[in-house]
Amino acid sequence: MTIQELATIHDATIITDRVGDIALLRRHYDDDGVRQLRHVPDPCDHLPESEWEAMTPEQAATRSC
């Protein structure tokens, strides 16, 4: 599964750190369904793309922030 597919499944944005590792940042919505601005939480799991793509959607869900 590609990183883009994982991001789509989890309604997440793909963010990259300085060394090129990736984290999935889930989108959050208010009660009216309006997307809320989020800052990257610290710490957030930044992993190489190959590690993300080796995960199942369920594993990725536990690692996304």
Image (spheres, rainbow, N blue to C red):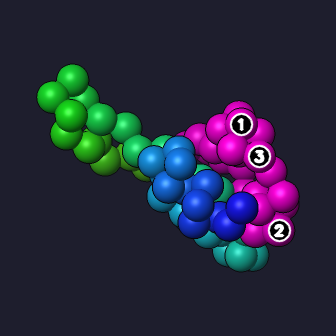
Callout 1, which amino acid? Glu
Location of mark 1 (residue): 58
Residue 29: x, y in percent?
Answer: 30, 35
Distance of label 3 from label 1 (alpha carbons)? 5 Å
Residue 38: x, y in percent?
Answer: 39, 46
Callout 2, which amino acid? Ser
Of pointers 3 and 2, the one earlier in the residue sequence: 2
Where 30 sits versus 7, above or below?
above
Nearest to viewer (mark 3 / mark 2): 3
Q: Is residue 58 magenta?
A: yes
Q: Is residue 36 magenta?
A: no
Of pointers 1 and 2, the one earlier in the residue sequence: 2
Q: Quadrant of the N terminus?
A: bottom right
Residue under the image location 64 percent in, 43 percent down: 64
Specify the farthest residue to the left: 32
Q: Start and end of the magenta stretch?
A: 41-65
Where 34 sits versus 52, above or below?
above
Q: Is residue 41 left or right of residue 44?
A: left
Nearest to viewer (mark 1 / mark 2): 1
Specify the farthest residue to the top: 31
Callout 3, which amino acid? Thr
Residue under the image location 55 percent in, 56 percent down: 7
Residue under the image location 45 percent in, 48 percent down: 11
**Local secondary structure at mark 1:** helix
Badge 1 local density, few (<14 within 10 Å), some, or many (20+)? Answer: few
